[in-house]
Amino acid sequence: YYEELYAFSYNPKQNDQQREEGWQLIDLGAEFERMGVPNDQWQHTDVNRDYKVCETYPRDLYVPITASKPIIVGSSKFRSKGRFPVLTYFYQEKKAAVCRCSQPLSGFSARCLEDESMLQAISKANHNSRFVYVMDTRPKLNALANRAAGKGYENEDNYSNIRFQFVGIENIHVMRASLQKLLEVIGARSLTMSDYLVGLESSGWLRHIKAIVDAAVFLTKAVTVEGASVLVHCSDGWDRTAQVCALGSLLMDPYYRTIKGLMVLIEKDWISFGHKFADRCDQLDGDPKEVSPIFTQFLECVWQLTEQFPHAFEYSEWFLLQIHEHVHSCQYGNFLGNNQRQREQLQLGERTHSLWDFLMSEKQNYLNPFYKPSYSEAHPVLEPSTLPYHFKFWRNMYHQFDRSMHPRQSILKTILTLKENSRKAESELQALETRLQKLGVTPIATSDPPAPPPTRDQRTNPLPPRPDSLILGAPINHKEVERHEEEDEQNEVGVEATERTDTERTVEGSSGTESRKQSYGELEGTCNGELAKEEPAVVSLELGVARMTC
Amino acid sequence: MEFSDHIKTANVEDVVLRQPLHPPSRGTLCITGHHLLFSEREEGSSQQVLLLLRNIDAIEKRMSGSSGTITIKCKDLRVLQLDIPGMEQCLNISRSIETLSCLDNVSEMYPFFYRPTDLSLQDQWGLSTPEKHYTQMKELHERWRLSSVNKSYSVCPSYPPAVIVPNCIDDETLKKVAKFRQGGRFPVLCYYHRKNGMVIMRSSQPLTGANRKRCKEDELLLQAVIEDSDKGFIIDTRSSQQVHQARMTGGGFESKSFYNCWKRLHRQMERGKALQESLIKLVEACSDESHNVDRWLSKLENSKWLSHVQTALSTAGLLAECVERDGHSALVHGYEGTDCSLLICTLAQLIMDPFCRTLEGFLALLEREWVQAGHPFQQRCAHSAYSHARFQQESPVFLLLLDCVWQLWRQFPLALGFSEALLLRLANEVYASDYGTFLCNNDQERCALGVKDRTHCLFRALLRPAERDYYSNPLYEPTELAIWPSVHPQSLQLWRGFFLRWTQLTHHLEAVQEEIRSMVIEWGRVAQR
C-alpha cells in the first residue's frame, strides 16, 4: 500500500538519468569524508552490509578502529533494537566524536562486556578526554521505569570511563499531546490574549522545544569546549537522539547551516539512522499512538536558532516550512518508510523522485538575504541563549494555512527582490564597463552613460518565477492556489504591465478581500454580518499541520 | 534653591561602574544639577557615561563597611550599579540623586538649560500649529471652522487655543457644551478622512450625572457632525457597566433617547493605575533570569500588557472600520479624554491615513494628538516601572501607544516611513529628555513657563538630516491603502527591542539589524543606479 502514495505517481517530467542524478545529490560517504572520517581512530565498517546486525541502521557505519566485529555484534545484542553505538558526527578540531545508540538492555543488573568495551573504544579514540559523556535524553523517571522491562541506562560502576547525564526530553506521547493541545488553543475562535498565553503555557510546547535546545547546547559544550566525546541515546535512539544529535551538529558545524548542509544533516541523522517517518507522520494510517511531531520539533528548534542568529543561516524559514510540507505530502520518496532497508525494498530510488533535487532547483527561493558566510567563520560554534523569553511561538508554521494571521507584508521577499535586483544591476554595469573598455572608452569620461536610465522598472523587476506557495510567504495548499490565481487575473485587469503587482499582492493584507478576514468588533448591519461569516470558525489545519498529530 | 545645595559631594574617585553589556570599569563619578557623569580612568580608555538624573526611576543603596553600593534603575529600564568608596560620600551621592532625579519644578529641568550648538531658540518650536493644520486642510473649510473660543484657555484648560469644530456651531454654543463635558473637553475634530469626508471627533465624557441631565447644545453639535448622514458611532473606551457607574460621580454617556442618530460601542480599555501595574509586572517578568518557560509565560500573561496592546489595536481597528469601511463619522471618549481616546485616535489615523505613516507625518500626528491635545505627560511619565514612590497619576499610555505602533510596524514593515529606532528614542525621551516637547501637561502650562521659547523641540531635532536618515525605514514604500493590523494574539509579540533591550541577545540583534539596514540601503542604491 505504500504504492498508493503520491510519490509513486508523481511525475515531474524528468528522464531516468535526471532522476538518478537527483538521488545522488546527497552522498553520506562524502559527508563523513568531509568530517575527516575514516581516520586513524575511526573506521568504516560493513558489518551491517545486509542489515543483519541492525535492521533500522544504514549499511554504512563508522566505529572506533578498536571496535572489532565481535564487540560490535555483542554490543548490538545488548542494545534495544540492535542499535549499537556508532559515529554520527566528528568534531575535527578536538577529535571528539558524537555517537548515537539506543538504551542498553541492562534491566536492574545485567551487564555486557562487549558493550562496555565498545564505550571504552569510543573513549580511547579521543585523546583529549579521559571519559565519554553518556547523555540519556529521557527524564530519569522514564529511564528508571524502563528497567522493569529489562531495558534501562548505563550503570557508571560498570562503565569505568563514562560520565552519565539525564537530559529530560519527554517521549513521543507527551509531545503528541502537547502539540494537540497547542493546536486546540490556537484554533479556538475569538481567542483572548490571556487564553492564548495560558494555553501556550499549559500545552508545554515551548518548554519541550527549550528542553531539546538545552540538550543540544549541553552536547555542543561537551564536544567543543571540553573536547570530550559524547554518546547520545534515548529509548530506541531514533527520536530524541536524532533531535539532539542533529541540532548539536548544527550548532557545531556551519556547514549544516547552509542549504545543502541541512539536507545532508537530515539525510544522515533522520533518514539514514531510521527515524520512523512513516509511523511518526502517519503516512499509511497506522497506529495513532506512533504519530508524533518529533521532526517538526527539530525544524522548530532550527527556526528558533535562525531568529537568534539572523546572519548564520543560508536558508530562511521558508526552507524549513517547505521541508516540513514535503515530509507530510508524500510527493517525494525521501521520507517514505521507516528505515533504509524498507526504502530499498520499495525501490524508491527507481520509482520516486528526490525532494532534495527539487529543493535545490529552487534554491533561490529559500535563501536568507542576511546570510553572511563571514559570520560563520568568526563564530563557527553557535552559543544560543536559552532564556525562556527567547522561545517564541512559530506562527508561520502553525498558522501556515491561515492567511489572516500572516505578516501583512513580507519583508523577506522584498529584501530578496531588492538584493537580486541590486546583484543584476551590478553585473549589468560590470558587463557594460567591460564592453566600454573593449571599445577603448574609459567609463568615467563618458558624460552620457550608455547604461539604461535608472527606472523604477529595474527595481520592481520580479524575481525569476517562484512557486505560488511563496507569494505570500508561506506554502499554501492547492485549493488556495487556485483561488489565488483567480484573484491574480482580477488584479491584472487594468494594471499596467507587471509593474508593482508583486508589492500589491503583499499589501493584499490591507486590500478589501483580505482584510475582511479581520474584524474588530460589534459593528452591526451591512458590513458586520458579512464580516462574521468570513471569519473561519476554526483555523483550518491542513496537510502537514493536521498530520503532525494525526 | 540652587542645585549646589543638593550636592554635598560632587566628585568621587575610584568608583566602580557595572552596567549591562559592558565589563565593570573603574573611574570618577561626578554629579551635576542634571547629570550623573562617569569617566573611566583605565589605561588608554576614555569611556564616559552621561546619564540624565531625570532618567533615574529608583535608587537603592547598600552599605558594607566603609564603602557602599548604589543601584540605579532607570526609566529606560537599564540597571546600573556604582561601588563607591567612603560611607559619607556614598550617602551624599545617593541623597543628591534622590532629590535631583525628581525635581517638581518644571522650569528647573534640564530642557531649560540644554543649548546644543546646532539648534537655535529662535527656530520655530513644534512642527505645526492648529491654525496651520486647518489652513492646509482645504477640504475641511466648507463644513468646518477654526474656533478661537479657547484663546485664553478659559473654556478648556487642556485644549490648545484653536480647535476645529462644525461651521454652524458658534462659540457661545461651544462654551455651553464645554460646561457639559468633563474638564471642558467638548467634541473637536481630530481627523478628516479624505476618501469619504467622514471625521473622527474626540472629547471627554458628558456630565449627565445621576439625574440624566441633558445639554441641547451638545446634542446640536453632534448632530452637526453627522449632518445629513444617517448615523455616527460613539466609541466609548469604557464598558457599559462602567459608564453607568460613572453617572454616580457626575459623569455619564450619550443616551440613545437624546442622541438618536449615534450608536454607542463600548470597549473597556484599562488606563491609569491598572496600566502602570501592568508595566511594572511586565518589567519584573523580563528581569527574571530563571530558566523556566512556564514561569515566563505565566508572568507574561499575568502582567496583561499584551492584552492591553491587543485591546488598543482592536479598538483602533474598530474605529477605523466605522470610518473607512462603514463610512460613518465617529466620536471617541472615555472619562477625561486625555488618555485612551488619544491612543486609539492616533492608531486609527495610522491605519487609515498614509501621510501619518511618514516620518514627518507621524511626528506631526504625535504633536497634534498628544502634545497639543493635552495628554498630561508630566503626570503620566513622572515615574516608570521601577519607582517605589508611586503617585496616582502615573500611567504608561504613551508607551502603550509606541508598543502598538511597533506591532503595526512589524506587520507592515514596508508601509511605515520610520524605524523601530524612532520608537525606542521616543520611549526614552518621554520619560527623560533634553528637549521641552514632553514637558508639562498641556499647552496652557507650556505657555505659562515659556517652554516654546526657552527649550528646544524634540520633533524638529529628529528631522535634522542625520537624524532623519537614521530614523527612516529604508524599505518604506508608501501605500494609499489602509493597513489593517491582525489583532489575533498569535500575531502580537512582546516588544523585545524595548522590554529586553539591555540583554545580550537584543544587543546582538540590534547590531545585526543595523547591518541589515546598511545592506538594504546599499542594495537599494545599487539597484536604482
Image (cartoon, coloured by chain):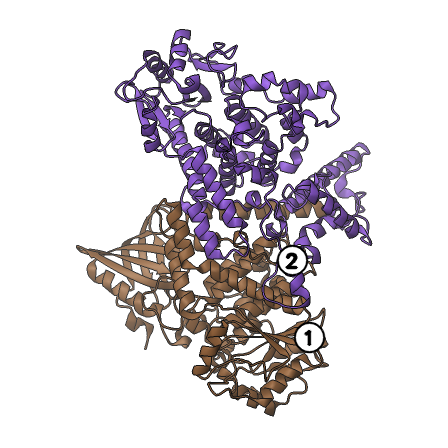
Q: Which residue is mark 2?
A: A533
**Label 2 residue SS:** helix
Q: Residue at x 58, y 35 (%)?
A: A324
Q: Marks 1 and 2: CB-CB under 8 Å?
A: no
Q: Position of residue B410 (x, y in %)?
A: 57, 53
The quadrant holding residue A206 is top left
For badge 1, the amino acid type reads Gln
The purple-tinted chain is: A
Residue type for callout 2: Lys
Residue occupied by mark 1: B136
- Tell me the number on the disc at residue B439: none
User: On the rendered structure, is B192 left or right of B305?
Assistant: right
Asked whether A204 or A250 is in front, the reply is A204
The residue at the point 29 percent across, 68 percent down is B7
Residue nearest the viewer, comparing A533 with B385 = A533
Q: Where's residue A74, x and y in %? A: 38, 11
Relative to B420, say whether B35 is above or below: below
